Image (spheres, rainbow, N blue to C red):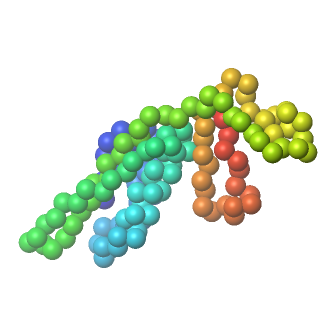
Amino acid sequence: MNVAGQTLVAKEELQQLVRIKPGDVFSRERLTESTKAITDRLGNEGYAFANANAVPQIDKEKKTVSFTILVDPGRRVYVRRISIAGNTRTGRGGATGNAPAGGGVLRFVQDPALPAARRPDPVLR
């Protein structure tokens, strides 16, 4: 399994996210999990619309297939404005107190190892 394209993070780090190893029986589910893990990792860097597509290379004589995952990070996502509605308990600064005044890059932290209640909220940097 090879990772190619505009990776923006270390290829070794993305290779570790691939859930199919040489010699494994093909599993579409594990291939899909691998491409999703790569797009989620790029999303953590602010590339919310990243794409990772697996391109097969089939060897009919050996009856094997190898994949190259092509990575396209897309454009980085920036936050211009945050609107909060329905907040009646805290003042105006209560809900946006940790956000920088000038906006910035939105990072999505999607660590599946953390329970949903303990995952950090998206942060601006």
Where is residue 29? Give x, y as percent: 40, 70
Q: Quadrant of residue 91?
A: top right
The residue depicted at 25 percent of the width and 56 percent of the height is 55
109 with respect to 16 (left or right): right
Q: Is residue 34 above or below residue 11?
A: below
Q: Which quadrant does the N terminus fall into?
A: bottom left
Residue lying farthest to the top in this orientation: 102
* Along the line of sight, the residue nearer the viewer: 97 or 65: 97
* Along the line of sight, the residue nearer the viewer: 6 or 10: 6
Q: Is residue 53 above or below residue 92?
A: below
Q: How many numbered circles are shown?
A: 0
Residue lying farthest to the left in this orientation: 61
28 with respect to 102 (left or right): left
Q: Quadrant of residue 7?
A: top left
Q: Is residue 104 above or below residue 60?
A: above
Whether residue 56 is visible, yes or no, is yes
Q: Quadrant of residue 54?
A: bottom left
Where is residue 5? Give x, y as percent: 32, 42
Whether residue 10 is visible, yes or no, is no
Residue lying farthest to the bottom in this orientation: 25
* Along the line of sight, the residue nearer the viewer: 93 or 85: 85
Where is residue 53? Give x, y as percent: 33, 53
Where is residue 11? Give x, y as percent: 40, 46
70 with respect to 13 (left or right): left
Q: Which quadrant does the C terminus fall into?
A: top right
The residue depicted at 37 percent of the width and 51 percent of the height is 52
The residue depicted at 71 percent of the width and 50 percent of the height is 120
